[in-house]
Amino acid sequence: MKRLTLSFALALFAAGLGALAAPVEAQSPPRTEWGDPDLRGLWTNGTVTPLERPDELGDRTHLTEEEAEAMRGTGLQAILDRVANTDEAITTGELNEIFLEPGTEVVRSRRTSLVVDPPDGKIPYLPEGRRRRMADQLHFLSIGIEFDSHENLHVATRCLWHGDFYTPGNLYLQYHRIVQTPDHLAILSEGGAIPRVIPLDGREQLPESLRQWTGSSRGRWEGDTLVVETSNFSGRSPFFGATDGLRLVERFSRHDEDTIDYSVTVSDPRTYTRDWTLENTLRSTEGPMFEFACHEGNYGLPNILSGARHQEKLGREKEAVEAATASGEPDGD
């Protein structure tokens, strides 16, 4: 939940009166005890701003204030509209604002998409990169896969990976805890138990032979902006179809007590035609961020496999009955 600061409330009041007083000087972002901009706290990157610019907006890069106001709070309805004709929407009853945590606000810049570069607001996929992205999405939905082994299932189903800090989740898992010291910054995301620990002490990057699911990050301050460069990905964690050649450059700039301006520039020559950049607004939230236990011990995984074995058994029994019927033999009843 956002907190309305006194200074912001006064600014709104003055604007409403049409005050002609001199503008208030820009305030320095909140700082830590040792003087760095303070990024600590619990943040949400949920937003109603779409990842890519909708085709109907053409080359428009920004919404008007009226359009932005109309979009606020529409996250749940946008999800329901996408699944309106599916069995899930009719039978499960889980698509509600209690189970889901859709974004409620547009990004602070009122951009028409989170992707701000290329100018068309689209991720610049190579054909192979787009194919990998679509294959991962189908895999996540368990479409067109075999259920012979746990290794056939998506890493999210196996409770190994549940999204990341870089982009907002479509449905939920959008909370992120940032902990900061003079020489390290750590990010624990709601979806999954792999914290990102980012050294800020100038140490060298890991050798290229050492690869990790979340990559290896190194951070540095450029003025009041924290710049984090991440490479050495293993290629096993899904990120928009990317390979182990993925490289990210993130920027965190504390705007005020309630918001952080965030951007990430993505590079992978085997997946994209060019580098691309996403911008989002991180908003302070009171939380709490509950444990995401993933199937409460991953009981779902053996149930999925045992369900597949049961379906196979039913299939064999049906085939036996059909074969007996075709040969004129009694079916045993």
Image: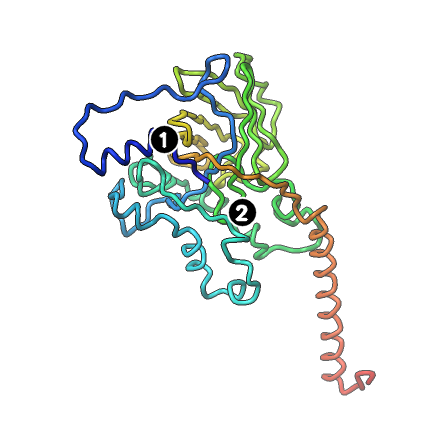
Q: Position of residue 263 (x, y in %)?
A: 40, 30
Seen at 44% across and 55% down, the residue is 79
Q: Is residue 312 left or right of residue 199?
A: right
Q: Position of residue 11 (x, y in %)?
A: 28, 32
Name which residue type carries label 1. Leu
- Mark 1, Cα crowd under 10 Å, few <14 / some 14-19 / many 20+, is few
Name which residue type carries label 2. Asp
190 vs 149: above or below: above
Q: Secondary structure at mark 2?
A: helix
View extreme (right): residue? 332
Label 1, on which residue?
6
* In front of the other: 212 or 245: 212
Where the C terminus falls, by quadrant? bottom right
Residue 136, which numbered label?
A: 2
Q: Please indicate, yes or no, whether residue 265 appears anywhere in the rendered image.
A: no
CA distance for labels 2 and 1: 46 Å
* In front of the other: 94 or 235: 94
